[in-house]
Image (spheres, helix red, strand yellow):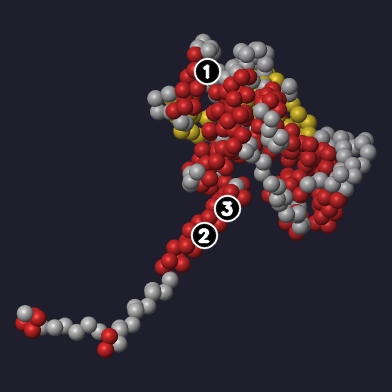
Amino acid sequence: MAKKRANGEGSIRKKPSGRWEGRYTQGIDPVTGKAIQESVSAKTQAECKEKLAKAIRENRGVPLNHTGDYTAAEWCRLWFETYNKPNIRYNTAKGYEGIIEHHIIPAIGAIKLKQLSSIHIQRMYNDLKENGRMPRGAKQNDKALSNTFVRRVHAVLQAALKQAVKERLIPYNPCENCRIPPKDKKEMTILPPEKIGRYLQEAEKYGVLPMFYLELSSGLRRGELLALQWTDLNVKERILTVNKQVTRMEGELDVTEPKTKNSVRKVALSQQAVDLLVQEHEQHPDNPILFPSPRTGGYWSPDAVSRINRKLLKNAGIEEHVRFHDLRHTFATMAISSGVDVKTLSSMLGHYSAGFTLDTYTHITNDMQRGAAEKIGGFMESATAKPEPEPPDPPEESRCKVIPFEKVV
C-alpha cells in the first residue's frame, strides 16, 4: 500500500515481491517535458524511508528546468508528479493523468506558462464541450464531453496553475477568469423498492445474499464492502467499522485507505443484517475476510461483483439499468424517505458534509419538502379558519315564558 507523505518527500509503497520502493521526482526532461522519476528500494519500510530521504537531499537543488521558462505541458506534468500524485489515490491519479495528457496538453501544452491566458483556456473548455478531444494520434472525436467532465478538467488545471502562482512562476491564475459549464442535472437511478424483494431472492439463490443485503441496508461504497473483515463487525453492539477499501492497481487487487478521512466511520446495522453476516462467517470461520471470493479465497474483484449485480437484475426481471453504485443511492433514498435525518445519513455514507448529502439527494428532499408544505398548509388552514357565527336569539314573542312554580301548583 502506498504511504502518503508530505509534498516533496516522495512516496513509499510495498511491492508484490515484499520489498519496499520509494519514488521521487528529480526534475523535468528538457526534451520531452516529462517529469524524471527516480526510485530507491529496500527490504524494510524504515530502510526505504531513510534511502528516499537521502536521495531527495542529494538531488535537492538540481534545477527542474534550466531556464525556469516552463511550457504549460512541462508545468502540468511537474505539478502532477510532485504535488498531486504522491497524495491521492491510485485511481484518482490515473484520472488526473488522463486529463492532463489527453485533454490539457493537446490543447494548450505548447504555450509558455507565462503567456497562457484566460482566452486560451476558455477556448479549450469550449472545444471540449462542443467537439470533444481524443489523445494524440487518434482521430478527432465528434462526441461532445459532458459538463461534468469539462468541470473536472477545469479543477485539475486550476489546481496546477494555483501552485504556479505560489511558486511565483506566473502573477495570477488565468483559470479564475474563465466561465465553466453548469453542473449536469442527471436523474438518479435506484432499485425500485417494490422490486428489492425479488432482487434479494435472486441474491440468495446465487449465494451472495449477505453481501447484497448489507449493501442495501448500509450504503457502503463497493470497495469498502469488499474490504470488510470479520473483526470489523461488533456483533454485540451491531456496529460495523469501515476503515479500508479494495481497489485495482496496475491489474492487481490492493487494500488501501478509504476514499477520504470522512470515509473512516462506524455504521450501525439492523439485527437481521448482523444475523446474516454471522451466518456468512460460519461458512468460512478460518478466513479473516468477511466476504471471501469462493474461487480464490481472497478479496472479491470489484468488477466481478458488478457483473453479479447485472445477473441478479436480469434473473429478477428488473428492467431498470441499476449499477452496483446505485444500490448505495437506493439505501440513501429509502433512509431519507423513512425519516432518517440528513446529518445522520451523511455520517453513515461517509460524506464530508450534510450539505453534500442534501445536494446529492435533492430530488428526494424536494418531495419531502412538498409533503411538509402540505402538512403545514393544512395546519395553517385550520389555525386561520373563521369560527362559525353564533345563531341569533329567537324573537321575543316566540320565546318560552317561565311560569312561577306557585302558579303551576
Write the residue at 25% across / 84% down. 399
Q: Secondary structure at mark 2?
A: helix
Which tag is nearer the camera, tag 3 or tag 2? 2
Q: Position of residue 106 (x, y in %)?
A: 87, 42
For marks 3 and 2, give the CA distance: 11 Å
Q: Disc 2 marks which residue?
A: 374
Q: Which of the 4 quarters of the picture holds residue 198? A: top right
Kind of residue at disc 2:
Glu
Q: Position of residue 225 (x, y in %)?
A: 58, 27
The label on residue 367 is 3
Kind of residue at disc 3:
Asp
* Residue density around tag 3, few if under 14, some if 14–19, many if 20 or more, within 10 Å: few
- The quarter of the image holding the C terminus is bottom left
First reached walking from the N terminus: tag 2 or tag 1: 1
Q: Secondary structure at mark 3?
A: helix
Write the residue at 41% across / 68% down. 383
Tell which of 328 and 296 is nearer to you. Answer: 328
Write the residue at 71% across / 28% down. 314
For marks 1 and 3, give the CA distance: 38 Å
For marks 2 and 1, give the CA distance: 45 Å
The label on residue 280 is 1
Q: Which of the 4 quarters of the picture holds residue 86? A: top right
Kind of residue at disc 1:
Glu
310 relative position to 399: left or right: right
* Residue density around tag 2, few if under 14, some if 14–19, many if 20 or more, within 10 Å: few
Tell which of 202 and 102 is nearer to you. Answer: 202
First reached walking from the N terminus: tag 1 or tag 3: 1
Disc 1 and disc 3 in contact, CB within 8 angstroms:
no
Q: Secondary structure at mark 1?
A: helix
Farthest residue, direction front = 409
